[in-house]
Amino acid sequence: GYEWADVAALGPDVAGRAVRVRGAAHAVRAVGRRVAFLVLRQGSSTVQCVVGGGGGGGGGDAGVARFAAGLSRESVVDVAGVVSLPREPVRGTTQQEVEIQVKKLYCISKATPNLPISVDDAARSEEDVVKAKAAGEQLVHVGQDKRLDFRVIDLRTPANQAIFRVQCEIENIFRQVLLSEGFVGIHTPKLIGGSSEGGAAVFKLDYNGQPACLAQSPQLHKQMAICGGFERVFEVGPVFRAEDSNTHRHLCEFVGLDMEMAIKDHYSEVCDVVDRLFVAMFDHLNKNCAKELEVINRQYPFEPLKYLPKTLRIEYDEGIRMLKEAGVHVEAMGDLNTESEKKLGELVHTKPFYTMPCSDDPRYSNSFDVFVRGEEIISGAQRVHVPEVLARQAEERGIDVGSIAAYVDAFRYGAPPHGGFGVGLERVVMLFCGLGNIRKASLFPRDPRRLNP
Ligand code: 4AD
């Protein structure tokens, strides 16, 4: 009996055991007529399989070796054989230390011999290609667009296997920390009548004859959940933005990590949750995903993220003063991101209509942004819970109040002061791992041009 085994579990401790392994034919190499080496890959682990090396002689060995040598790369293969210690220590960073002496070999699914991209080419770092070129060697580097076109092959690279494990951990920690703080997970509708963030970046559609759109955020309904008596809620779900900006950090569909909570005294209570959540998240990743981070770093070199146990909080005016001192030209009340000169009082209008103005000075708002590696990943705020103010602020921004009437009305039946934040899952992955492009953090990215695969 050959027992099913995972490649990652094959080590010297199981030498001598009869195992059965299913994986992808990562590489095949014939040695003479009687022996073939087959490198089998499962996830980001590989193991070398020796086919026909049993010394049995005769046509049998040559037949199976020929069959192995003829396997197309990426075909799904079952091998049954005995785990053995190799004569020479195995090189290669992801390869197991042991080999399998193959007794039986089956091809389960044959891959086309004309693969559009190879996993090895896709797994190469730009640095490797540059180095090889300097040494007069020609290595293929597959561009990002082509890799995304053939994403199912591209996803097989060790870095991609690691990136999406890290993504899963981030989502998981988001849930765990908020659950431990008394939050309830919810799901809000993605088909809605009025746009949730305002502005032009909204996908419009026809809902059985009614105008509708895809939710730009769970904003309105997560607040309505607070009105519905849930004091603390969170959601992990798709967010749709009809972005026309082709940048390294904008997607048309991304995964939103959102929360909303009733607040007692001050909206900084929301910031306190941000601190606890993200410090726990980053600590967890460094501790539990060290292997994944190392694998990602090999293909996409990055400096580990530095973070403080408590986020540095800078008041808006203080930020402006620091920028000025650093010689950056900014106007008071100007837009920090574009550094464009904006007239006094304009800032509050750049915040969405549901944002609570500052009670001391309505030119400011009770809102905050969080930056990682100099880029925004989180935006949050206290919300307006007074229906009249909400309706007025929506109107001022040209939003059809009729289309969000049920939302505004929700605050007429008694609503506690509340606030929350939203963060893009792909942005967290991209910035924590220093990937440089959000598409690398999305399994099948949707950007202004890409709807496939
Ligand atoms: O800053 P945004 O638009 O804020 C909201 O949606 C609010 N309703 C959230 C809140 O509770 N105040 O989006 C929130 C986060 C951003 O900080 C960013 O991380 C991410 O979502 N994000 C995007 N990620 C990828 N592609 C895009 N086009 C994104 N737009 C925003």
Image (cartoon, rainbow, N blue to C red):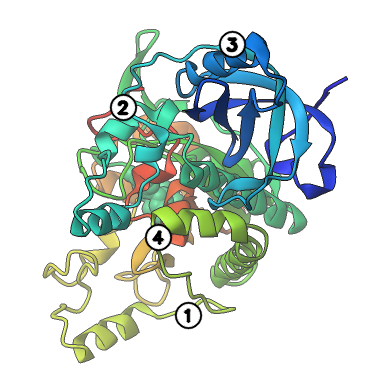
Decide if residue 270 is on the left or right side of residue 149: right
In primary-sequence order, the first of circles 4 and 3 is 3
Which residue carries the number 2 mark? 149
Circle 2: element type: helix
In primary-sequence order, the first of circles 1 and 4 is 1
Q: Which mark is residue 63?
A: 3
**Which quadrant would residue 128 be assigned to in this image?**
bottom left
Whether tag 1 and tag 2 are in contact, CB under 8 A, the answer is no
Residue at 42% over, 59% down: 431
Q: Which mark is residue 312?
A: 1
In primary-sequence order, the first of circles 2 and 4 is 2
Whether tag 4 and tag 3 are in contact, CB under 8 A, the answer is no
- Please say if 62 is above or below 243: above
Decide if residue 166 is on the left or right side of residue 253: right
The location of residue 124, given as percent across then percent down, is 36, 47
In primary-sequence order, the first of circles 1 and 2 is 2
